[in-house]
Image (cartoon, rainbow, N blue to C red):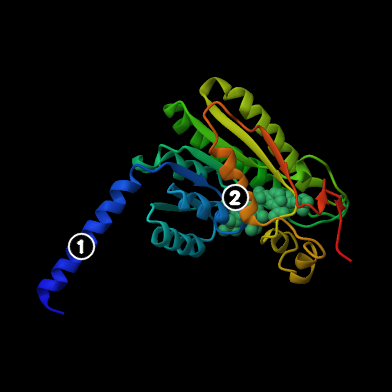
Amino acid sequence: MSSSKKASEKKLKLFYLLIIHYFAAMNKIILITGATSGIGRACAFKFAAAKYNVIITGRRQERLLELQAKLEAEFGIAVLPLCFDVQDREAVTAVLTNLPEQWQKINILINNAGLALGRDSFEEADLDDWDTMLNSNVHGLLYVSKAIIPFMLAQKKGHIINMGSVAGKEVYEKGNVYCASKFAVDAITKAMRIDLLKNNIKVTGIHPGAVETEFSLVRFKGDEATANSAYLGYKALTANDIADTIFYCTNLPDHVCINDLVITSTQQAGTYYFHKNG
Ligand code: NDP
Ligand code: 8X3
């Protein structure tokens, strides 16, 4: 290729990048915790496709970088990957309160990072598993929210989505502390909505039944057979179903706020009842 052709191609590329940056600077901003897998990752794709700039978080740096590259290439939006453990109060606070200025006007926060560990009877369950669930699902959500709410207060506007569960509506056998952590999310969601009412910040609780993600693989600590059995004999929800639901809730008129939304597969009712095939 001639040097003049190379130079003009380079100029064209630069021009294209400038255009992308110009338009990306006008996009809305969403922060999604736990975007390296499942529901969080599906949300990242859904909102990126709608031209939101996306802040993605998780503990697995390689997955964050892979997701960043995909979203930027596919949708021409800006992505900020942030690697931290939501249980680590100092890390959460240090990273999120020092966001680069162009990322501070957050419109939507999805508090999604979380997990279940073990499915054991109360007297047999592991204390470390209980600590990890409470620290991630409850404390993590609080640390992230405390860091992000000031950015929403500054804009006099915002929307917080807290990921609960049907397990936070109804306790089931051997669900003990996972259920307790999601009951806490439900209570915190209601409390946030009341306290933030005066600040024009919407707060929505999303409470899914079984969604086929890495959730069960994590819960059963890598035991694939047990994890897969959680989704046998019925069509579970998909991560995209939840992303679509959240997108709907966050794209309603300013005066409309969905407070609380329980969503299950058509073959599930509550935490315990499934209508399985055959
Ligand atoms: P996945 O295991 O597929 O995804 C969980 C996400 O949370 C990952 O991105 C993981 O990232 C992140 N995460 C977990 N712990 C931490 C931590 N300590 N610090 C930072 N990030 C963390 O599960 P789902 O997508 O299904 O779960 C997402 C949320 O939905 C959870 O809160 C879960 O309780 C809830 N939920 C799930 C249901 C289901 O049936 N799947 C049903 C109802 C609610 P990384 O490992 O990289 O840190
Ligand atoms: C995940 C759904 O029913 O496994 O929150 O607890 S369940």
Residue located at (55% from left, 38% from top): 250
Q: Position of residue 217 (x, y in %)?
A: 71, 64
Extreme residue toward the top, this view: 198
Q: Secondary structure at mark 1?
A: helix
Q: How many marks?
A: 2
Q: Position of residue 272 (x, y in %)?
A: 86, 50
Is residue 194 among what the camera can see?
A: yes
Give the residue type that dot 2 points to.
Ala
Q: Earlier in the sequence, mark 2 or mark 1?
A: 1
The disc label shown at residue 12, or none: 1
Q: Secondary structure at mark 2?
A: helix
Front-most of residues 49 and 183 = 49
Label 1: how many Cα within 10 Å (few below 14, some 14–19, many 20+): few
Give the residue type that dot 1 points to.
Leu
Residue located at (67% from left, 29% from top): 190
Judge from the rendering whether residue 267 lies leftward or rightward of residue 80; answer left or right: right
Alpha-carbon distance for marks 2 and 1?
Answer: 36 Å
Quarter the N terminus occupies? bottom left
Q: Position of residue 113 (x, y in %)?
A: 61, 49
Is residue 132 among what the camera can see?
A: no
Q: Position of residue 180 (x, y in %)?
A: 77, 42
Judge from the rendering whether residue 155 lies leftward or rightward of residue 202; answer left or right: left
Q: Is residue 3 above or below residue 210?
A: below
Residue located at (58% from left, 52% from top): 40
Extreme residue toward the bottom, this view: 1
Q: Residue under circle 2?
A: 243
Extreme residue toward the left, this view: 4
